[in-house]
């Protein structure tokens, strides 16, 4: 008997979900909102590449022993040199890059080796998302340039020297994470708000509420429909940034949890308001506090710690941290668990509110 009820519930939910997905494809307003969001995300990804198209490649170094070649490298006109005073700071600086760059550790005995007949070897480091061909090109370019500057052949060893981004680094990891959050937020809210508004206008939501479907089944179907479109948008971002991702399970889980939150927010707005102008106003008022903290939360060097701690309770900031952790070398549960749980708790509250609002409207 229990299995029969479960199958019946699933059939009802699927029927409503399938109808809403098709309606979304047919709706020009919905499609234009989704396409606009994806266009913004693509531009967001391509813009750094365009800005750095004619820029000099970056060389980041840590000099272990005060080598005499560093002043010579500083005068180069073929690359930009950044010298850091520790290996940790060198690697940290490298993770902030949004285009392929090379980091070198200048050994203490390099000057001595340059006086001999052999070919000194220095350790080079690249980011984990840099392709093998780009890494080899960086290696070849800097071997040639440095050898010409110092007047002696130098070999750069990069095999196995991979640096991973961290959960709090910026650069390409932050841009990709922000793109995912923006897609989930804008599609999740704007699509479901428009879906609910259209169904109110056509009285379709009223028909659903007096059908055999319960309020909970209707709400779950709306959540699944919104999730479908959020996953489509997120797939575009993942395709553009697939080389960044080291923990696919985590980034997919974050997308699902985050989508349920934003879709729930959109359903709630669409259930409460009857006038499109009200929806537009409240939509703006909600987008602002959800997206602005994403950019303010990285300004810990200029903003008070108390304010940064407040931002950590914003669900979009929690999602940003989850996504950046999914790009790093390790994803400990102690870091990602609290962030996912926070967003899930917001979602449960929204689901409860939506069911309550729909039941009241059914009366």
Image: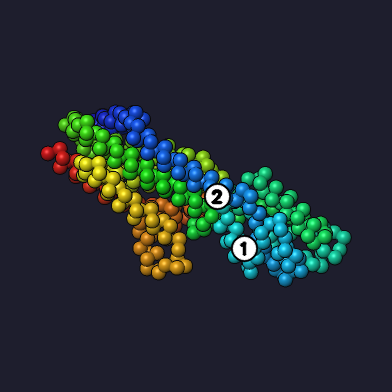
Q: Quadrant of the C terminus?
A: top left
Percent position of residue 163, x then y: 60, 55
Q: According to the image, what is the colour scheme of the structure? A: rainbow
Residue 90 is marked as 1
Mark 2 and mark 1 in contact (Cβ < 8 Å)? no
Residue at the extreme bottom: 66
Whether 179 is drawn above or below 70: the answer is above
Residue occupying the point 43% across, 53% down:
320
Whether 207 is drawn above or below 270: the answer is above
Residue occupying the point 49% across, 47% down:
44
Residue 290 is marked as none
Horizontal placement of 165 versus 333: left or right?
right
Residue position marked by numbered label 2 in the rendering: 48
Which of the two discs, 1 and 2, labels the residue nearer the N terminus?
A: 2
Q: Quadrant of the N terminus?
A: top left
Q: Nearer the viewer, residue 55 or 89?
A: 55
Percent position of residue 165, x then y: 55, 55
Horizontal placement of 51 versus 233: left or right?
right
Q: How packed is label 2: few (under 14 Cα within 10 Å), some, or many (20 or more)?
A: some
């Amino acid at each position: 008997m229990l299995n029969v009820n479960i199958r019946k519930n699933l059939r009802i939910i699927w029927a409503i979900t399938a109808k809403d997905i098709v309606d979304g494809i047919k709706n020009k307003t919905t499609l234009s909102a989704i396409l606009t969001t994806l266009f913004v995300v693509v531009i967001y990804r391509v813009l750094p590449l365009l800005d750095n198209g004619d820029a000099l490649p970056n060389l980041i170094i840590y000099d272990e022993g005060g080598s005499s070649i560093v002043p010579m490298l500083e005068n180069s006109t073929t690359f930009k040199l950044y010298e850091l005073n520790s290996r940790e700071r060198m690697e940290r600086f490298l993770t902030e890059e949004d285009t392929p760059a090379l980091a070198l550790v200048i050994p203490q005995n390099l000057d001595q080796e340059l006086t001999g007949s052999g070919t000194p070897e220095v350790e080079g480091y690249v980011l984990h998302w840099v392709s093998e061909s780009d890494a080899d090109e960086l290696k070849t370019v800097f071997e040639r340039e440095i050898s010409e500057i110092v007047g002696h052949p130098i070999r750069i060893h990069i095999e196995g020297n991979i640096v991973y981004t961290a959960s709090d680094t910026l650069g390409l990891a932050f841009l990709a994470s922000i793109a995912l959050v923006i897609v989930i937020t804008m599609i999740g809210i704007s699509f479901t708000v428009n879906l609910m508004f259209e169904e109110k206008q056509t009285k379709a939501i009223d028909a659903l509420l007096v059908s055999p479907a319960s309020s909970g089944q209707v709400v779950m179907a709306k959540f699944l429909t919104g999730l479908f479109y959020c996953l489509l948008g997120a797939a575009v971002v993942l395709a553009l940034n697939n080389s960044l991702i080291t923990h696919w399970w985590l980034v997919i889980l974050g997308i699902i949890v985050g989508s349920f939150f934003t879709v729930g927010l959109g359903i709630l707005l669409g259930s409460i308001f009857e006038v499109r102008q009200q929806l537009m106003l409240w939509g703006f008022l909600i987008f602002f506090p959800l997206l602005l903290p994403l950019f303010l939360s990285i300004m810990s060097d200029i903003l008070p710690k108390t304010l940064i701690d407040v931002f950590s309770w914003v669900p979009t900031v929690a999602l940003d941290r989850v996504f950046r952790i999914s790009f790093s070398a390790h994803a400990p549960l102690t870091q990602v668990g609290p962030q996912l749980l926070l967003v899930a708790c917001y979602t449960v509250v929204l689901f409860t509110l939506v069911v309550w609002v729909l039941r009241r409207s059914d009366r």
